[in-house]
Amino acid sequence: MFDNISSPEFIREYGEPIDQDNNKAYDYYYWKGGLKTASINTDEDKGKIMRLIISSTDDAQFENSLQTSKGIKLGSKKADVLSKYGDHYYKSYEQGADIIGYIDHKRNITLEFWCVPGGRVAEIRLDDADVI
């Protein structure tokens, strides 16, 4: 499911990272097209992607061509998320965003849609459920 930032397929698709932030748990990389990843920074799993984030580029809040397999992208309406992904979700609120999250227990992943006031998706996160 999650790739490694050093894999030939990932490099072919996204090239070299534009920028990097590190913290104690993960290395965060910024890639072309508004993709951000968090990857393991130690041991044999170094580089394994644990989080994918689709966010806006520069000053255009909803500009990004990346989307989910069900066609949800930045700027999509919250109602569209609920229509495509269903009513079995959790809610959270963080950093001024109304968050709608779905858990896939079989694949051990979560998919979150961060909505800004006005009900539009401003960020999409796909996480390994073990991300801290």
Image (tube, grey):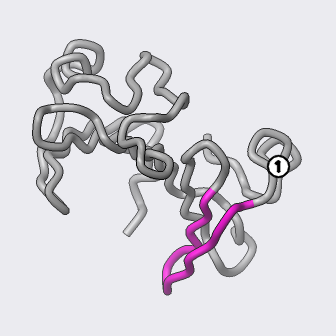
Of the 4 image quadrants, the one containing the C terminus is bottom left
Q: Is residue 112 left or right of residue 38?
A: left
Label 1 sits on residue: 11
Between 69 and 98, the one nearer to me in the picture? 98
Vertical placement of residue 47 versus 67, above or below: below
1 vs 121, left or right, is right
Q: Position of residue 71 (x, y in %)?
A: 43, 17
Instruction: Assess disc 1: are there few (<14), some (14-19) or many (≥20) residues with their C-alpha within 10 Å of its C-alpha.
Output: few
Magenta part of the protein: which range? 17-30
Nearer-the-camera pick, 107 or 54: 54
- Residue toward you, 119 or 81: 119
- Residue 9's place in the image compared with 78, above or below, is below
Residue 21 within the segment the image draws in magenta: yes
Quadrant of image for the N terminus: top right
Up/down of 55 relative to 118, above or below: below
Q: Between 38 and 30, which is closer to the camera in this rendering?
A: 30
Whether residue 13 is visible to the viewer of this picture, yes or no, is: yes
Determine whether the residue tagged by mark 1 lies in a helix, strand or loop. helix
Look at 54% across and 63% down and name the residue there.
38
